[in-house]
Image (cartoon, rainbow, N blue to C red):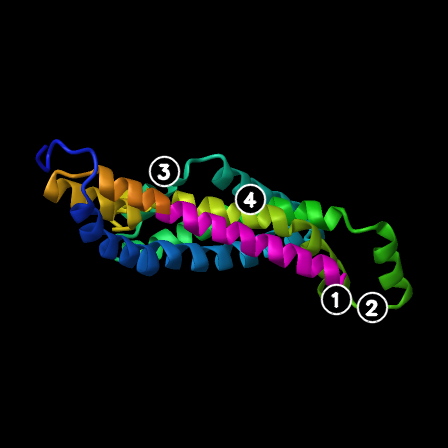
Amino acid sequence: MNDQESLWNWDHAWAVLPDLLWSFLTVTLVVTVIGSAIAAVLGLIIAVVRQVAPRPVAGIVTLVMNLIRMTPLVVQLLFVYYAFTSVEPLTLGILVVGIHYATYMAEVYRAGIDAVPRGQWEATTALSMSPGRTWTAVIIPQALRSTIPALGNYVISMFKDTPFLMVITVTELVRTAQLYGGRNYRYLEAILLAGLIYLVASYLSSLLVARLEKRLAFTS
């Protein structure tokens, strides 16, 4: 059986693996880590603004958030890519992914904030705590403990959505696998290895989230 007829070829698997790992480390992982940081911070800001801002401002923020949530990530990537042609595609991808997921994380934070017992709010009032101190020392820490699992799930989802960046010419993990397959007429090894890398990364991320959840529960 020759090379083209065999179902699996280890030579091609070993040949493409370094390129796949490099793409994962320099693009997929970078987009996920920075995008998650943007989403976590911006999502928290959105959630707090919706709680404390005047109703017209909160309404505008909610409207924009819903518009982002209700349109596909691919459409947002393409729109921004063609609207800001002078910006590096990888930078655009990180920002779009981060903002897109911030709208989902904002809802998670909102649920966490609503779950804080009313007595905690009343206690801060009785202690004459400032609004800033109330949020940073009492409300947000308690809200975070209940939101870690859901936030972690969105980080894992972000991992799996990074292939969408290929539509704006970013050579991430899956695109690297496709390019190798096109050059060598061997797609199976590259695509399967790319899938395994995603599987391992997602599994390790889930373990990290579970460990963080237990740690926060222990310190509460």
State which mark lies toward you, 4 or 3: 4
Answer with mark 1 or mark 3, whichever residue precedes in sequence.
3
Q: CA distance from mark 2 to mark 3?
A: 45 Å
The percent coordinates of residue 42 (x first, y second) are: 54, 56
Q: Nearer the viewer, residue 193 or 177?
A: 193
Which residue is depicted at the point 18% across and 52% down? 15
Q: Would you call the spot at circle 1 few (<14 residues within 10 Å), some (14-19), or many (20 or more)?
A: few
- List the residue tagged with mark 3: 75
Q: Residue furthest left?
A: 2
Answer with mark 2 or mark 3, whichever residue precedes in sequence.
3
- List the residue tagged with mark 4: 104
Q: Would you call the spot at circle 3 few (<14 residues within 10 Å), some (14-19), or many (20 or more)?
A: few
Mark 4 touching mark 2, by CB under 8 A?
no
Name the amino acid type tagged 4. Answer: Tyr
- Marker count (numbered): 4
Answer with mark 1 or mark 4, whichever residue precedes in sequence.
4
- List the residue tagged with mark 1: 137
- Tell me, yes or no, if residue 88 can be seen here: no
Name the amino acid type tagged 1. Answer: Ala
Disc number placed over residue 129 in the picture, else none? 2
